[in-house]
Amino acid sequence: MVSIVMIEDHTLMREGLKALLHSRPDVKVVGEASEGKQGLKLVERHKPDLVLLDLILPGLHGLEVLRRVRKYSKVLAVSMRSDEAFVAEAFVNGVAGYVIKEDSFDELIDALHAVLKGQRFMSRKLDQRRINRVTERLGTDATSTEHLTNREHEVLQMAAEGLTSSHIGNVLSISPRTVEMHRANLMRKLGLRSQADLVRFAIRNRIVAA
């Protein structure tokens, strides 16, 4: 039995996909979430075989969710985005398979089986050759956030959105001084020197929207 957590903000899409998956005796949806932080908690709790992840989510960005959940489960992206740079960035950040919402349910099942076997899967509607080239370039140039702690990830996102240390401290229930410590640590780890560098990094890595 394959256990799945779905993270998808559109209710109709989530409910429809869940109904289709429930028709299969070899699949069990053990949790569903409409936003990233809730989805993270479900993945940490259930540690499913597979996460079906929409990469455009409210709140915590889908790529950030991907970077955090991939240590627990294989991740199959189910997205409206088909532009090469975005798809390539998803693979650089650890997605195992990528289907687009125009694909059929049969193709989703093919992707599911391939990913669970340890194979990479890409929608047949995508130009695999071109995306592979972009992926190789991004893999060479990208600065990874894997070595940041969960708290540093949270501070990075909120700082990039322009929140002050006091505001971030209130949201996270920590002191402004502790926020500054996390900020200094993440800046050092990522090789950033200024707020402008931090914002550019967050936009480039899809942590916040441009």
Image: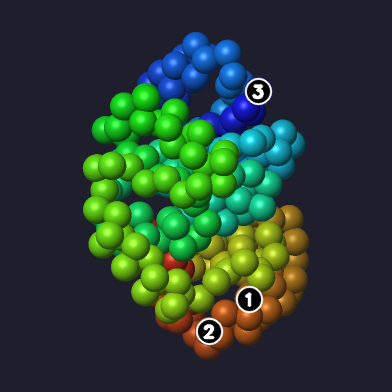
Please provide percent x and percent y for residue 53. 48, 40
Q: In front here: 84 or 11?
A: 84
Residue density around tag 1, few if under 14, some if 14–19, many if 20 or more, within 10 Å: many
Question: Which residue carries the number 1 mark?
Answer: 186
First of labels 1, 2 by sequence position: 1
Corner quadrant of residue 121 = top left
Residue 96, position in %: x, y? 50, 49
Q: Nearer the viewer, mark 3 or mark 1?
A: 3
Given the image, on which type of amino acid does mark 1 rest? Answer: Leu
> Can see residue 19?
yes
Quarter-of-image position of residue 136: bottom left
Horizontal side of 196 relative to 44 (left or right) equals left
For disc 2, the marked residue is 192
Q: Quadrant of the C terminus?
A: bottom left
Whole-percent x and y of residue 119? 50, 47
Kind of residue at disc 3: Met
Residue marked by disc 3:
1
Task: Report the residue at 72% width, 34% height from top.
Answer: 46
